[in-house]
């Protein structure tokens, strides 16, 4: 279960936490490389063969696309409560993400030059979402809504179908609700290869986003450059900074919310100010796990990366969290505003005891697709700009060129770029 220890940078538990990475076995890379190459060379035939081999699904028999009838059936099967929850969550995401749309600008200089910055949506996106083990409906709308807000005209979804060829009705309902009807019954590295390279029946896309197992993540890594990817998703993590007034039950439940993902690599970490408080938190974790049948779901993750560190000050906790750069940070503090400006490395920061991490995972409007394993030091979470590209427009009149020609020529020649300099000289 969770380990309690005095914090220091030399503490082996903390050092182990910093070394934690999402590792993919070498044999996975070898397999994925082979799949990508075969799909690139042979298209649909290899995609169908790999779907049979890995997923026991015959695409020729079940069909490549989700049908209109399947979408209609999904609307009948899901509950009214689910429909209402989806509507409200999506409303919140649309409201927040519309604020992220970049605004172009134009700048006119004294010499007559006009420089502009413009933004345009990427043409096509494929979103991969697992569906056979758990229907990750929140992940689907977290990927789709930024792309829709950006104005991407061609959006495709990939999900592993069940053995009978069906896809979870909750996923189909979300796709239908957001009017994304291009839904492939594809998965794994073979599915990503199909959308990255294009086949006889699968459209080539410009961007691939979404989670998946090691084979999916390795495919994204190897396909980067052929397409844009969001990032390589690592295991979930949370780091909580708590003062003495923070509710041990709330802290325990929030630590459990990450540990239950179940790979064994999830990290649930709390920094508190006393051993007494740490013991209360641990006891609550034990109680809640036992009472809610979550012992098995959380045990391995808690043993590997479940820690309650006792710190001498809140500032020490802040410094430690910034070094971890967690996917999620929570501030369960009376004076959280003073701390908020100091937490600079985190995918998302949840402030106050009722801002529990699941409100961001599902509902409030922010995006739950976030950097993990320390990459929050230099990466941002999913946003509308993931699905847009910016470019500059240069309008340089004759007067401006002649005014600045000597500067440009000098700079070009300093680099030995004679043709660059010549392109300006011939216009003088």
Image: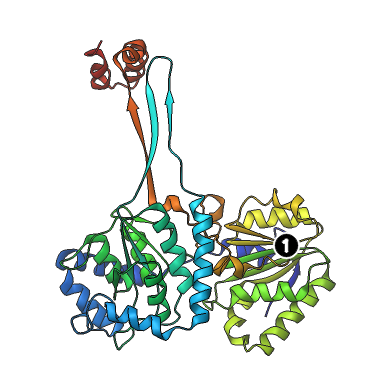
Q: Position of residue 371 (x, y in %)?
A: 52, 58
Q: Position of residue 151 (x, y in %)?
A: 37, 53
**Is any part of residue 3 visible from this angle?**
no
Query: Does residue 47 appear to the left or right of 378 in the view shown?
Result: left
Q: Quadrant of residue 313?
A: bottom right
Q: Quadrant of residue 264?
A: bottom right
Q: Position of residue 65 (x, y in %)?
A: 25, 75
Q: Which of the image's four quarters has the C terminus?
A: top left
Q: How many marks?
A: 1
Q: Which of the image's four quarters has the N terminus?
A: bottom right
Badge 1: how crowded within 10 Å, few (<14), some, or many (20+)? some
Colour setting: rainbow
Residue 196 in the image: above or below residue 251 = above
**Camera-side residue of 215 and 109:** 109
**Camera-side residue of 362 and 374:** 362
Tell me which residue sits at (24%, 66%) in the image: 194
**Is any part of residue 137 visible from this angle?**
yes
Tell me which residue sits at (66%, 73%) in the image: 255
Q: Position of residue 37 (x, y in %)?
A: 22, 65
Task: Indicate the secondary structure of the residue bearing disc 1.
Answer: loop
Tell me which residue sits at (35%, 84%) in the image: 73
List the residue tagged with mark 1: 352
Query: Does residue 132 appear to the left or right of 22 in the view shown?
Result: left
Query: Does residue 199 appear to the left or right of 309 in the view shown?
Result: left
**Camera-side residue of 209 and 307:** 209
């Amino acid at each position: 279960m969770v380990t309690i220890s005095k914090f220091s940078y030399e503490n082996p538990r903390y050092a182990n936490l910093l070394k934690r990475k999402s590792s993919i076995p070498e044999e996975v890379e070898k397999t994925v490389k082979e799949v990508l190459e075969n799909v690139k060379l042979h298209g649909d035939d290899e995609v169908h063969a790999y779907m049979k081999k890995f997923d026991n699904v015959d695409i020729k028999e079940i069909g490549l696309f989700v049908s209109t009838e399947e979408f209609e059936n999904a609307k009948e099967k899901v509950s009214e409560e689910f429909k209402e929850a989806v509507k409200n969550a999506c409303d919140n995401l649309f409201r927040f993400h519309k604020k992220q749309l970049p605004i172009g600008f134009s700048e006119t200089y004294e010499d007559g030059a006009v420089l502009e910055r413009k933004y345009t949506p990427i043409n096509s996106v494929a979103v991969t979402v697992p569906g056979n083990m758990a229907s990750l409906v929140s992940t689907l709308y977290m990927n789709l809504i930024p792309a829709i807000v950006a104005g991407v005209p061609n959006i495709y979804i990939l999900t592993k179908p069940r053995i009978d060829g069906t896809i979870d009705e909750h996923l189909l309902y979300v796709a239908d609700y957001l009017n994304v009807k291009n839904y492939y019954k594809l998965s794994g590295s073979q599915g990503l290869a199909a959308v990255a390279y294009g086949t006889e029946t699968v459209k080539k896309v410009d961007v691939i986003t979404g989670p998946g197992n090691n084979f999916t993540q390795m495919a994204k890594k190897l396909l980067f450059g052929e397409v844009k990817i969001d990032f390589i998703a690592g295991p979930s993590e949370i780091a909580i900074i708590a003062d003495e007034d923070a509710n041990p039950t709330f802290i325990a439940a929030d630590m459990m919310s990450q540990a239950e993902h179940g790979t064994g690599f999830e990290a649930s970490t709390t920094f508190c100010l006393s051993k007494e408080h740490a013991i209360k938190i641990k006891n609550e974790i034990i109680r809640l796990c036992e009472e809610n049948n979550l012992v098995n779901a959380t045990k391995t993750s808690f043993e590997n990366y479940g820690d309650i560190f006792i710190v001498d000050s809140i500032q020490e906790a802040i410094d430690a969290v910034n070094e971890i750069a967690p996917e999620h940070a929570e501030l369960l503090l009376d004076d959280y505003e003073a701390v908020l400006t100091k937490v600079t490395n985190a995918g998302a920061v949840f402030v106050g005891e009722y801002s529990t991490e699941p409100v961001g995972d599902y509902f409030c409007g922010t995006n739950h697709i976030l950097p993990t394993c320390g990459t929050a030091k230099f990466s941002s979470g999913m946003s509308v700009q993931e699905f847009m590209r910016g470019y500059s427009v240069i309008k340089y009149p004759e007067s401006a060129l002649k005014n600045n020609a000597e500067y440009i020529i000098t700079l070009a020649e300093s680099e030995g770029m004679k043709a660059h300099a010549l392109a300006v000289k011939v216009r003088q």
